[in-house]
């Protein structure tokens, strides 16, 4: 028998970078603070162009929600999902309510992959 973790949910999302740039231009920091943690904002704005990285994190949050089979609302907020970047592959940190949702569907971890170009960002999440 294999020791591999079994997938129990999967999500994918594709975001246009321009959509994120325009939202930030319109709503300013209010937009950023509603969706992203201080660490995510700092990471993205350490780049020359923060918008592809912001779009990738937005896509990751959407992909995680899909992997958890839940929409954003009372039980799940954008800020209850954080993309952690520490020099290697990104990982996900969940707030208590999001972790409870993951546990309720039989999971104990989330795997994430993100990528972006100058115009699009994509993310895939797998709940295991």
Image: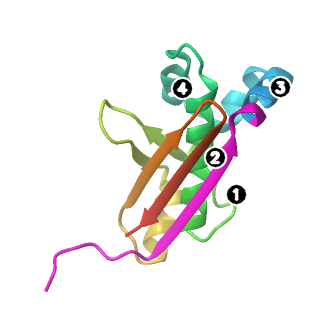
**Disc 3/disc 1 C-alpha distance (Å):** 20 Å
The residue that mark 2 highlights is 78
Local packing at callout 2 (Cα closer than 10 Å; few below 14, some 14-19, many 20+) is: many
**Disc 3/disc 2 C-alpha distance (Å):** 16 Å
4 or 1: tag closer to the N-terminus: 4
Q: Are marks 3 and 4 in contact (CB under 8 Å)?
A: no
- Whether residue 96 appears in magenta in the rendering, the answer is no
Q: How is the image coloured?
A: rainbow
- Residue at the spot x=43%, y=53% of the render? 112
Local packing at callout 4 (Cα closer than 10 Å; few below 14, some 14-19, many 20+) is: few
The residue that mark 3 highlights is 27
4 or 2: tag closer to the N-terminus: 4
Q: Secondary structure at mark 4?
A: helix
Q: Quadrant of the C terminus?
A: bottom left
**Position of 3 relative to 28 (above/below):** below
Q: Secondary structure at mark 2?
A: helix
**Position of 126 relative to 50 (above/below):** below
Q: Quadrant of the N terminus?
A: bottom left
Tell me if 124 is positioned left or right of 74 in this view: left
Q: In the image shown, does 118 or 75 lie closer to the viewer?
A: 118
**Position of 70 relative to 111 (above/below):** below
**Rendering coords of residue 28 (x, y %):** 78, 21
**Rendering coords of residue 121 (x, y %):** 60, 42
The region drawn magenta spans 1-19
3 or 2: tag closer to the N-terminus: 3
């Amino acid at each position: 028998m294999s020791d591999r973790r079994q997938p129990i949910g999967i999500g994918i999302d594709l975001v246009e970078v321009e959509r994120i740039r325009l939202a930030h231009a319109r709503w300013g920091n209010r937009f950023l603070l509603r969706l992203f943690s201080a660490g995510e904002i700092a990471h993205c704005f350490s780049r020359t162009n923060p918008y592809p990285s912001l779009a990738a994190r937005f896509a990751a949050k959407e992909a995680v929600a899909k992997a958890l089979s839940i929409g954003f609302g009372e039980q799940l907020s954008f800020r209850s999902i954080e993309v952690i970047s520490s020099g290697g592959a990104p990982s996900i940190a969940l707030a208590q309510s999001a972790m409870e949702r993951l546990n309720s569907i039989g999971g104990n971890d989330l795997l994430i992959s993100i990528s972006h170009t100058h115009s699009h960002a994509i993310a895939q999440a797998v709940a295991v």
